[in-house]
Amino acid sequence: MAKKSMVEREKKRQKLVARDAAKRAALKVIISDQSKPMEERFRASLKLAQLPRNGSATRLHNRCQLTGRPHAYYRKLKVSRIMLRELGSAGQLPGVVKSSW
């Protein structure tokens, strides 16, 4: 099931982002500090480039936690519109009432 693997990949990325957040922030502070020597800022930028790409927060993507679908994602429920409809019809979402869809 390819969709489930995308969910697992996204969870792995979230762990990497949480792990590397402090290190990335510290390097970015050094890079943006104009009072530091240029060599030190350049070394910090090289260290930042050597960190894993998936550790960057911009690599995260909102995906449905049930199907892995990246489009039509509801942030509060963490599901796609399709799963929202199915779960709502089945009565598995509290506070959601099927009227006419």
Image (cartoon, rainbow, N blue to C red):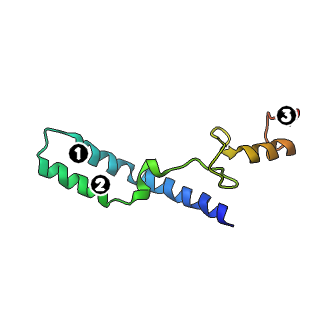
**For mark 2, what is the residue?**
48
**Left or right for 5, reference 58:** right
Using residue 38 as the reference point, say whether residue 17 is left or right of it: right
Nearest the eye: 26 or 83: 83
What residue is at 35 percent from the left and 48 percent from the top?
22
Q: Which mark is residue 75?
A: none
Q: Secondary structure at mark 3?
A: loop
Distance (Cα) linking label 2 and label 1? 9 Å
Q: Give the secondary structure at mark 1.
A: helix
Disc 1 marks a residue whose amino acid type is Ile
Q: Which mark is residue 97?
A: 3
Disc 2 crowd rating (10 Å Cα; few below 14, some 14-19, many 20+) is: some
**Residue 26, horizontal then vertical, whole percent:** 28, 46
Q: Residue at x 12, y 52 (%)?
A: 39
Question: Seen in the image, is 12 located left or right of residue 39?
Answer: right
Residue 67: image x %, image y %? 69, 55
Q: Earlier in the sequence, mark 2 or mark 1?
A: 1
Q: Residue at x 65, y 65 (%)?
A: 2
Q: Sequence-wise, which precedes: disc 3 or disc 1?
A: 1
Secondary structure, mark 2, is: helix
Cα–Cα span, label 2 and label 3: 49 Å
Which residue appears at 13% of the width and 47% of the height? 38
| Label whose residue precedes the other's in the sequence (2 or 3) | 2
What's the amino acid at mark 3? Val
Query: Mark 2 and 1 residues: CB-CB less than 8 Å, in contact?
Result: yes
Labels 2 and 3 touching (C-beta < 8 A): no
Q: Which mark is residue 31?
A: 1
- 87 or 18, which is in the foreground? 87
